[in-house]
């Protein structure tokens, strides 16, 4: 099995059970080993009292992209630590894109950077996630 096929199969298995990302209207736009791109459109239900996208939804988008990137090797991986810095507001009607990339993978621990951007290319937020591999696989691989 190629690394790309493994990443796609892992993503398909995760997406099948990812009710949260689906419920929020996210799409999984691209996955490859150690990388993932997800997006969603900011709707009126995502706005806070300042009429901008609530930070929790931006965090969730980044966290979901992080999850698909670090789970792209057919190993079960969970978040160990996450942080986010908000840099510019997102408004209703904008499609936000979270691009996750692996920075380091050593043993069972990984480090990932996720940039959330607006449709005009501006950076809305920067997210860093630390991951930890646990027991199990997303699908059974045949040798």
Image (cartoon, helix red, strand yellow):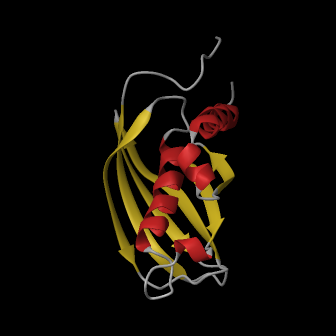
Quarter of the rendering occupied by the C terminus: top right
Which residue of the protein is positioned furthest toward the top in this rendering?
143
Answer whether residue 67 is visible to the viewer in this image: yes
Q: Is residue 106 above or below residue 27?
A: above
Q: Is residue 66 above or below residue 121?
A: above
What is the x, y in percent for residue 10?
61, 33
What is the x, y in percent for residue 57?
48, 66
What is the x, y in percent for residue 46?
53, 72
Q: In the shown orientation, is residue 88 left or right of residue 27?
A: left
Q: Is residue 127 above or below residue 20?
A: below
Q: Is residue 91 above or below residue 29?
A: below
What is the x, y in percent for residue 61?
52, 61
Answer whether residue 34 is visible to the viewer in this image: no
| Residue closer to the observer: 50 or 13 | 50
The answer to which quarter of the image holds residue 11 is top right
- What residue is rendered at 62% in x and 58% in y? 38
Quarter of the rendering occupied by the N terminus: top right
- What residue is rendered at 62% in x and 32% in y? 13
């Amino acid at each position: 099995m190629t690394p790309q096929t493994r990443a796609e199969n892992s993503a398909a298995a995760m997406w099948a059970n990812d009710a949260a990302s689906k419920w929020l209207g996210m799409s999984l736009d691209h996955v490859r080993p150690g990388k993932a791109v997800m997006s969603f459109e900011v709707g009126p239900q995502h706005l806070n009292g300042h009429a901008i996208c609530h930070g929790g939804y931006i965090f969730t988008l980044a966290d979901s992209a992080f999850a698909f990137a670090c789970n792209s090797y057919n190993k079960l991986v969970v978040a160990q630590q996450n942080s986010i810095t908000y840099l510019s507001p997102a408004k209703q009607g904008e499609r936000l894109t979270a691009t996750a990339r692996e920075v380091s993978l050593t043993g069972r621990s990984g480090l990932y950077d996720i940039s959330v951007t607006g449709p005009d290319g501006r950076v809305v937020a920067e997210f860093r996630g630390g991951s930890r591999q646990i027991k199990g696989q997303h699908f059974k691989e045949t040798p």
